[in-house]
Amino acid sequence: MSPLVFLVAAAHATNDLYMGFLSILYPVIRERFGLSLAMVGTVSMVAGMASAFSQPLFGAFFDRRRVAVSLHLAPLLTAVLISMLSLAPSVPVLLGMLFLGCLGSAAFHPKGASVTPVLSGNRPEIGMAVFSAAGNLGLAAGSTVIGFFIAAWGWRATPWLALPAVAVVTLLFVLLPPRRIDEQTKGRTEITLRGLAADRAGLAAILRLVFINFSITVGLRGLQTFLGIHLTDLGTPMTAVGLLLTVTLTLGAIASIFVSSLVRRLGSRALVASSILAGPPLGVAGVLLLPRPLGWVLIALSGMALGWSNPVLILKAQRHAGDSPAMASSLQMGLAWGLAGIAMLPLGALGELIGTRNLLVVSSLVPLLGLVSCFRLPKDAAAAGATAARAKVPPAR
């Protein structure tokens, strides 16, 4: 596996670091602008839609045009705009900046997921696990970084936090310039939306994977959006909330690398099912036991269980999409995450009626909805056979 995989993974960690800021900023934004839970859900929905729904469009565009420079510029756009949210004078301006910043994140993911398997040689599952884990680690670190930064220097100083992204993007330009990315990916056969729609079996499998990913992501995003609000209402310091979210996402990232190494032995379907079955009960028990320490531990373990299936879902989707990394990963990370973002609005409205504690219980149970779809997925051998058969036929363009 090429060392360049770790460079792309570092760019992924940098990109998602700034998205991790949002978990801590939700209670800050709520207090500053006097928002209701439903409005907080709306802010989360805007972030989710911008960073997710646009990914399939970026994926289709990159498959056809191969715009390699997006790998470099997208994290920079995300870093600058998310770091400058503290300068927004009103909610509409804040939403506009958030939307554009999340578009940068959306542009990065399809290209990064497309390049990673190429650089990974004969172990694409490990390369994708490293790529995914790096993003999760960046997302995890974001809540702690922004929490301690605001506690030390205040929210108005956050524009300075864009500087690390400038350094990483500069390194990426030097060691992996756009021209080299084009050379690495030249000649790959990738399927378009039209070709994907023509393969009904592959499309059905991908849609099941999207629904599974949506269900799991609602559980995770529900924690990221409303757990901080619930704990701050209980008097928990912001720095402690940031540490809890960081530990939760870090455990998921580390576990995902280990779990991905078991794909060839146990099969992806069993590993995804284990994620769905383990996460919800741990999450519910953790929420009910808060603010006791055992509740914190169980929530961290719940996030770990829900997080370890992410690279497995992406890689399985790629194998059902003519082995087209940009298109498959953008559908998984785009459509599923976008729908999960939209779900934050009704969840926030529900929280106004039942309270944040009960809301967190409900969102923790949502991943169970994906269990039936999980058991209806084709086995890995079937996916590999379908991919091999499609490789003999020129893709539709």
Image (tube, helix red, strand yellow):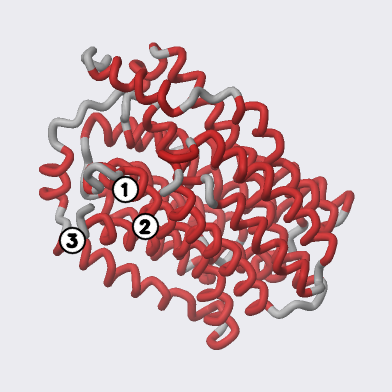
Task: Residue type at mark 2: give it.
Answer: His
Whether residue 287 sits left or right of residue 330 in the image: it is right
**Residue in the picture at 17% in, 57% down:** 176
- The local secondary structure at tag 1 comes to helix
Separation of marks 1 and 2 at Cα, in angstroms = 7 Å
- The local secondary structure at tag 2 comes to helix
- Asked if residue 286 is positioned above or below residue 234 in the image, the reply reads above
In this view of the protein, which residue sits in the foreground, 266 or 49? 266
Read off the residue under disc 3.
173
Residue lying farthest to the bottom in this orientation: 152
Estimate the x, y position of residue 357 in percent, counting from the top left. Answer: 83, 58
Task: Residue type at mark 3: give it.
Answer: Phe
**Residue in the picture at 54% in, 32% down:** 210
Q: Is residue 2 visible?
A: yes
**Residue in the picture at 59% in, 23% down:** 376
Label 1–label 2 contact, CB within 8 A: yes
For marks 1 and 2, the one nearer the N-term is 2
**Are there few (<14), some (14-19), or many (20+) residues within 10 Å of tag 3?**
some
Read off the residue under disc 2.
12
Estimate the x, y position of residue 397 in percent, counting from the top left. Answer: 25, 17
Label 3–label 1 contact, CB within 8 A: no
Image mark count? 3
Return the mark for residue 312: none
Task: Residue type at mark 1: give it.
Answer: Gly
Whether residue 283 sits left or right of residue 145 in the image: it is right
**Are there few (<14), some (14-19), or many (20+) residues within 10 Å of tag 1?**
many
**Residue in the picture at 32% in, 22% down:** 387
Is label 3 or label 2 in front? 2
In this view of the protein, which residue sits in the foreground, 397 or 365? 365
Return the mark for residue 112: 1
Separation of marks 3 and 1 at Cα, in angstroms = 14 Å
